[in-house]
Amino acid sequence: MTKKILVTGGAGFLGSHLCERLLEQGHEVLCVDNYFTGAKANIRHLLEIPQFELMRHDVTFPLYVEVDEIYNLACPASPIHYQHDPVQTTKTSVHGAINMLGLAKRVNAKILQASTSEVYGDPSVHPQSESYWGNVNPIGIRSCYDEGKRCAETLFFDYHRQHSVGIKVMRIFNTYGPRMHPNDGRVVSNFIVQALKGDPITIYGEGQQTRSFCYVDDLITGMILLMETGANITGPINIGNPNEFTILELAQRVIELTGSKSELVYKPLPGDDPQQRQPDISLAEQELGWNPTIALDQGLEKTIAYFRSVI
Ligand code: NAD
Ligand code: UDP
Ligand code: UDP
């Protein structure tokens, strides 16, 4: 069945892949973005498709459209970007969620929230399962993002309980792949760009902190599977790749796969940087039958090929 689907943040990294996949499935896609961190270049190849529509709009303002489903991805995701205007970051998560939930309520649409592993903060439970409530600093430099996303989750569950809105809350763990912004400061894009340019690879702290990296195609598969579940499944549900690496190991993989001569340099660890992060994905396996399929080296090769073509 063809659906009319709204994707907020659709010109960003994950949003552009999602729009592409939904169009491949034959749906009509309305992409809404204010181009803060996204770019027309990410979705230019979709503009010729009659089922695709692009709208410049900031989700902190109301939006009146008629759709069957809403994927709410609008929000800067990299620390450099979300810390650039922290007040706007919180507004995007909170006012954006209120507006999109108000829209979902009015048109009776299912709505999925792109939440984040950051709701777990610097976790004292490892790996993180959905039942863990997190360890988040409410007043630190990452709080605009973490607390904004936590409040958005609260709003989703209150609209569900109070107004019977059909919700899906997805907690996304670090995801990488083609169309990441080359200058957004995230570790995978930074390391690949530095390696390809022969610049020093910047390790923050001692590089012993860990992350678990999911390739974008796997993530999008999980996102659509979650949206397609029945009304009894609301999440929150973790989607990510449980393969955990230290940042130093990631640097070594990137150097090897690019054949780079870059050296490692050590820089101070930013404030509130989580020490470890690994998703427990048993719920996604059980409820969605979902598992990531793309190993880090495989995903890095595709991402390196992309960055070679754009830098
Ligand atoms: P991104 O920065 O590439 O995309 C975000 C998009 O939202 C951009 O196109 C940006 O222009 C748009 N946007 C920002 N503020 C907006 C506003 N007020 N109104 C309309 N559009 C706005 O980031 P991404 O990696 O594609 O992340 C997409 C979503 O997934 C975000 O909500 C992010 O928090 C979440 N997420 C991503 C990751 C990851 O590893 N990539 C991890 C956890 C959660
Ligand atoms: N809203 C929107 N599009 C709609 C319906 C609502 O953007 O189609 C916004 C509107 O700005 C409203 C918010 O969503 O303030 C919350 O809507 P809700 O119906 O929950 O609250 P109310 O309108 O009573 O404030
Ligand atoms: N990081 C790093 N060098 C960089 C960029 C990031 O060592 O050039 C580290 C960062 O301190 C963090 C990890 O890599 O520990 C992941 O950072 P990213 O910003 O990609 O994601 P997040 O911290 O939001 O998980």
Image: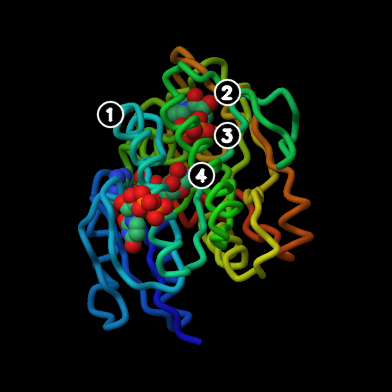
Residue at the disc numbered 4: 155
SS category of the residue bearing label 1 = loop
Above or below residue 267? Residue 181 is: below
Q: Which mark is residue 284?
A: none
Q: Earlier in the sequence, mark 2 or mark 1?
A: 1
Left-right relation of 197 to 257: left
Q: Label 2 amino acid?
A: Val
Left-right relation of 233 to 150: right
Comparing labels 4 and 3, the label whose residue is closer to the camera:
4
Q: Label 3 amino acid?
A: Val
Q: Residue at x 48, y 80 (%)?
A: 25
Residue at the disc numbered 3: 119
Residue 188 appears at what percent x and percent y? 47, 40
Q: Are marks 4 and 3 in contact (CB under 8 Å)?
A: no
Q: Is residue 6 at least partly visible in the picture?
A: yes
Q: Label 1 amino acid?
A: Asp
Above or below residue 200? Residue 48 is: below
Residue 160 appears at what percent x and percent y? 58, 54
Ligand 2 sits in quadrant: bottom left
Q: Which mark is residue 136?
A: 2
Q: Residue at x 40, y 36 (%)?
A: 78
Alpha carbon separation for disc pair 2 and 4: 18 Å
Comparing labels 2 and 4, the label whose residue is closer to the camera:
4
Query: Few, some or many C-alpha atoms within 10 Å of disc 4 (few <14, some 14-19, many ≥20)?
Result: some
Alpha carbon separation for disc pair 2 and 1: 20 Å
Q: Earlier in the sequence, mark 1 or mark 4?
A: 1
Q: Earlier in the sequence, mark 3 or mark 2?
A: 3
Q: Which mark is residue 85?
A: 1
SS category of the residue bearing label 2 = loop
Q: Are marks 1 and 4 in contact (CB under 8 Å)?
A: no
